[in-house]
Amino acid sequence: MRNTDMHRRAFRQVVVAAAVAAVCVLGVSFAGMWTWGTVQVVRALPEGASVANDGSVFWAAARLAVAGDWLAPFDAERLAAARALAPDQTQPIMLWLYPPSYLALTAPFGALGFYAAWAITAGLSLAALIGAFAVFRSLGAWQSGAIVLAPAIVVCLAQGQNSVFFAAALVVFIETWRRERVWLAALALVVLSLKPQLGVAIAVVLLATGAWGVIGRAVLCVAVMVVATLIYPGGAYWSAWLQAVQHAGDVTLASGLGRLLISPLGLGLAFGWDRTAALALQALVSGLVLVVLARTWRQAAVSPDAKAAALSLAILLVTPYVVYYELVFALVAAVYLIGVPGAVGKSQDQGQGQGFALVLWVLPVAAHFLGGVIGYGVVAPILLVVFLMVCRRGNAVAGASS
């Protein structure tokens, strides 16, 4: 009987190891495919033309700011012209939706060529994310490699998106707040405020835990930053920004970018629902997620890593207009879940947190193939299930210890 059990455990370990290896090979191959495809796109472009990705939008806005016209990015035609795309490259209308403090941060890159700016921002963003984890969590070589080769990282950086940078800011915020370095946590929040659409879940966690020290310092820093931008580039920028934000949803859906949404809103649209019904689904799921998130963070016995993973996933679930390229926040959750124990603390349950981490690590691959057929919103139920499982297990630990 004992030998039979040993054989079963050994067989199970071999099967699990083979499955993990297969998933890793799939993920790395996918990352390689994206990298190779991006290189081929660049090589096919005429000399001097930039790539029609989100990175060229950031670069174009920076170019216009360097030229002295900070309001020009809100003019869709001028923004498109500044991207310097090849004549045969077409893209939907892109709106500029960032506050003046973000443009001030990225304006220096407008003095560079597109490819230099793209390479430098990608390198700095990746270094910031790995550095944030390495400083606070002592990453091993294999963990750092798993981040660098993660499909979410490759997709995000190839698209020229900025989510890797903001994911690094999220890690710094979580870790400094955990260590009660209040001013550093507040400054990380200020950085996160440069992409305000990601802030709802963070605000709920801060209020639920009564983190008034962090809130007060962050509000003070943001107020100083807003006053500075009212002086230059001035109130006209804020007025143009608010007007652009009001129309962002309409433009996103009208341009066909709605199929890239990974939120519950995107799920409803993938099912062919009208916008009103899809937004109702978004509101319902967001309410559930925020209530569960607040309860999880209020439990002192819940693992800090489980809380961090839950927050990272909640950001994706409660933000209506969050796209495929921002699955890097799911990667942050995956890194935290590697060390999350089971609900009852048994050693054999340790692998369940690692299983969730593996699912989130490879999720962009599944999203890529399923999204092309149905819509990327099919990712939302997977994110929701992992979120609820992480919170349920964390609250079970809290209940068992109380």
Image: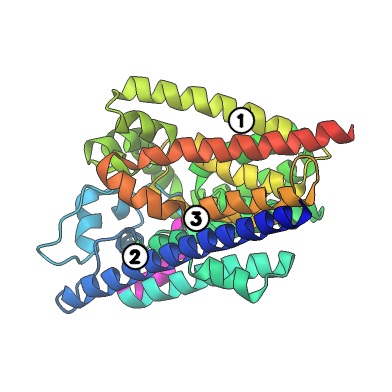
Q: Is residue 113 magenta?
A: yes
Q: Earlier in the sequence, mark 2 or mark 3?
A: 2
Q: Give the x, y percent position of residue 367.
A: 38, 48
Residue in the foreground of this view, choosing between 191 and 264: 264
Q: Which mark is residue 328?
A: 3
Q: Relative to 237, is 127 above or below?
A: below
Q: Of the residues shown, which amino acid type is indicated by label 1?
A: Leu
Q: Nearer the viewer, mark 2 or mark 1?
A: 1
Left/right placement of residue 196 relative to residue 391 reads left
Residue at screen point 35% across, 28% down: 268
Q: Which mark is residue 290?
A: 1
Residue in the foreground of this view, choosing between 250 and 10: 10
Q: In this rendering, does residue 113 appear at all?
A: no
Q: Relative to 258, is 146 above or below?
A: below
**Disc 3 element:** helix
Spatial CA distance of label 2 from label 1 is: 35 Å
Residue, disc 2: 59
Q: Of the residues shown, which amino acid type is indicated by label 2?
A: Trp
Q: Nearer the viewer, mark 2 or mark 3?
A: 3
Spatial CA distance of label 1 from label 3 is: 20 Å
Residue at screen point 72% across, 30% down: 295
Quadrant hosting residue 31: bottom left
Q: Of the residues shown, which amino acid type is indicated by label 3?
A: Val
Q: Earlier in the sequence, mark 2 or mark 1?
A: 2
Residue at screen point 61% across, 73% down: 142
Residue in the foreground of this view, choosing between 254 and 32: 32
Residue at screen point 58% across, 30% down: 289
Stretch of the chain drawn in magenta: 102-114
Q: Give the x, y percent position of residue 282.
A: 45, 27
**Label 3, residues with CA under 10 Å away: few <14, some 14-19, many ≥20:** many
